[in-house]
Amino acid sequence: MGPSETLEEKYYIKEVDTDKKSIYCHHDLMGELLIPTHKHEKAQMLYSEGGIVHVTTETKSYFLPARHFIWIPAGIKHSIHPNSEHVMMRNLYFPIDSNEDLFYQKEGIYPINDLLLQMMLFTNRWNGNLKKGTRNFSIANAIKAILPEICLTNLPLSLPLAKDIRLNKIITYLDKNLGETILFSDLANRFGFSERSLYRLFQKDLGMSFIQYFTIRRILKAIELLLEKKLSVSEVAQAVGYSSVPTFSNTFFKILGQRPSDYLKGIEILKK
């Protein structure tokens, strides 16, 4: 048996699609720091607790914080990288229906509200195929049916993957200096670009400006630091380059839809 087969069996990936009409359910502690690239014929709803999960598709790197879920449409190749082996992942895999709502055809990250959280926790003791016509199938299907009604904000918790080698070097530099004030002119200078050509490179390769990219990257780092609970909100703001806490809080709100302090309260709810 080759290593890829071992991994597939270990990660129940083959089982997900064995019954085309079932909803497949899998809840487990990660236990590993990588689920290699794979895809399913079913769409996947992945909810995580206790840490951060990075989901990488062929074009984007998604950042899934605790108390949020990612919807991965059927057939999308992806790998999963949690930041800790102790992250709890709850997965529901849904068969595709004809004439589905457009919601189900788009990748997206959404906050989980109390109703969805209770419904997900209700499925906690289920594992494996939920057969069509059973009570458990109907309950899981209700979770899917309600998503387009209540998940109105697809959060921009993803960054495009750079294809240009020169841009990769710049992004590595930015990652190491998230707490510093970085002027675009200095950045261009440091890497031997004119401002105009670097601006164009960001737009062409990533589809966004330097400011958009750097802002999202900083806020993603802030979420990581808030989850670690070692720093106060003002210390987190400083660590990701904001000298003003209100500016940090407003930027955080624009991206995540809640204030840093409220996000922290949501995490505490899970712990109780």
Image: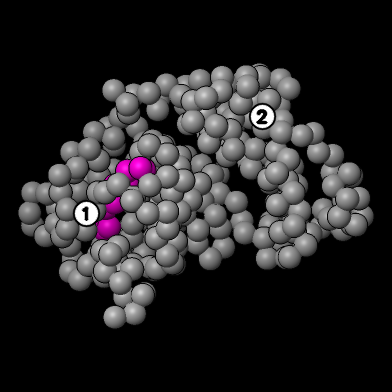
The image quarter in which residue 2 lies: bottom left
> Can residue 265 be seen in the rendering of this structure?
yes
Residue 93 shown in magenta? yes
Contact (Cβ within 8 Å) of mark 2 with mark 1: no
Residue at figure coordinates x 58%, y 33% from the top left = 222
Q: Amino acid at mark 2?
A: Ala
Residue, disc 1: 25
Q: Is residue 209 left or right of 263 when viewed as pictured?
A: right
Instruction: State the residue in front, 268 or 21.
Output: 268
Which label belongs to residue 239?
A: 2
Provide the major secondary structure of the magenta segment: strand
Which label belongs to residue 265?
A: none
Mark 2 vs 1, N-terminal side = 1
Q: Position of residue 202 (x, y in %)?
A: 75, 55
SS assignment at label 1 = strand
Q: Which residues are magenta?
A: 86-94
The quarter of the image holding the C terminus is top left
Residue at figure coordinates x 71%, y 59% from the top left = 168
Instruction: State the residue in front, 237 or 143.
Output: 237
The image quarter in which residue 25 lies: bottom left
Q: Position of residue 94 (x, y in %)?
A: 26, 58
Q: Position of residue 226 (x, y in %)?
A: 52, 28
Q: Amino acid at mark 1?
A: Cys
Give the Cα separation between the discs numbered 2 and 1. Answer: 39 Å
Q: Is residue 218 left or right of 138 when viewed as pictured?
A: right
Location of residue 158 with respect to 75 vertically, above or below: above
Q: Position of residue 75 (x, y in %)?
A: 39, 68
Residue at figure coordinates x 56%, y 19% from the top left = 232
Residue at figure coordinates x 32%, y 43% from the top left = 88
Location of residue 165 with respect to 263 vertically, above or below: below
Decide: few, some or many residues near mark 1? Use Cα within 10 Å; few <14, some 14-19, many ≥20: many
